[in-house]
Amino acid sequence: MNMDQLKREAAARALEEVRDGMQLGLGTGSTAKHFVELLGERVRAGLKVIGVPTSEATRLDAVRCGVPLTTLDEIDHLDITIDGADEIDPALNLIKGGGGALLREKIVAAASDRMIVIADDSKWVATLGRFPLPVEVIPFGLGATRRAIEKAFAQCGVSGQMAVRNGKDGHVFVTDGGHWIVDAQLGRIEDPAHLATALSAIPGVVEHGLFIGLASSAVLAGGEGIRVIERRKPKGD
Ligand SMILES: O=C(CO)[C@H](O)[C@H](O)COP(=O)(O)O
């Protein structure tokens, strides 16, 4: 099975958790796209659900697949968010934002009773940090924000090159919220919760790709089959 088939397998397993009447957060990326497509098949067969997309790309996919959509202004909570990740550690802390949708992804995950992460098992790591950490920033005052980020890294015992992300067209990548992303090559993040708190305190940082204590479970598809890992503590504890 190739990686794309594994992603679809993980998406199909997560779909088994969806029940009639649920309000769903719809993630972003190639794995989440499989979920939206499979969900669309079930909707066309009569399943009644409503979704909140985490990006314009996912909104378009959901419309194409016939999944009814709403917003977090119209409903007061979500039952489950199903989303991919760039890295997942054994505590189910995540790095997300490879697709640039981390801000909306985190808002939607935080508004959900449960977050199910779907991925091929190459995303499973002992320690976060090999994948460059995305930090979403306001373009104004970027120099000052970068210096503050470097200081936060030093306080948390990490360091590494930072680069403003470019899009496929070679121009600066602009998020759905109109911000930029700085990717930081940190290698190893020994204390992701500490780093998450330090980054969140910086003016000019809109959001970062560390998702701490948000994922309830992870569905990992690999050559040996599917593994479901539950987070030990319930969300909110
Ligand atoms: O965080 C994300 C987008 O912002 C994605 O979930 C993450 O990049 C994983 O993507 P893929 O499923 O394509 O590997």
Image (cartoon, helix red, strand yellow):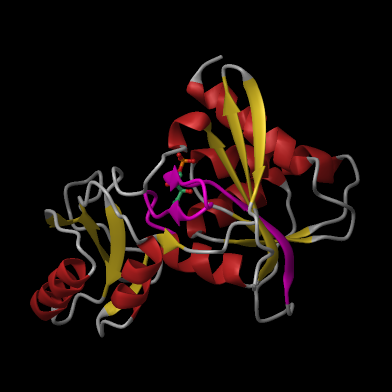
In the depicted structure, whether residue 62 falls above or below residue 157? above
Q: For the magenta stretch, what is the residue range? A: 77-101
Count of marks overlaid on the render: 0
- 160 over 76 or under it: above or below: above
**Residue at position x 65%, y 62% in the image:** 233
Residue 2 in the image: above or below residue 81: above
Q: Name the residue at 62% across, 30% down.
A: 8
Residue 98 located within the stretch drawn in magenta: yes
Tell me where residue 33 sits by quadrant.
top right
> Residue at coordinates 42% horizontally, 39% vertically from top-left?
125
Question: x%, y% of residue 101?
Answer: 43, 59
Q: Is residue 49 left or right of residue 139?
A: right
> Was residue 229 drawn as part of the magenta stretch in this picture?
no
Q: Nearer the viewer, residue 17 or 20?
A: 17
The image position of residue 24, as x and y in percent, is 72, 59
**Image quadrant containing the N terminus:** top right
Q: Is residue 201 left or right of residue 12?
A: left
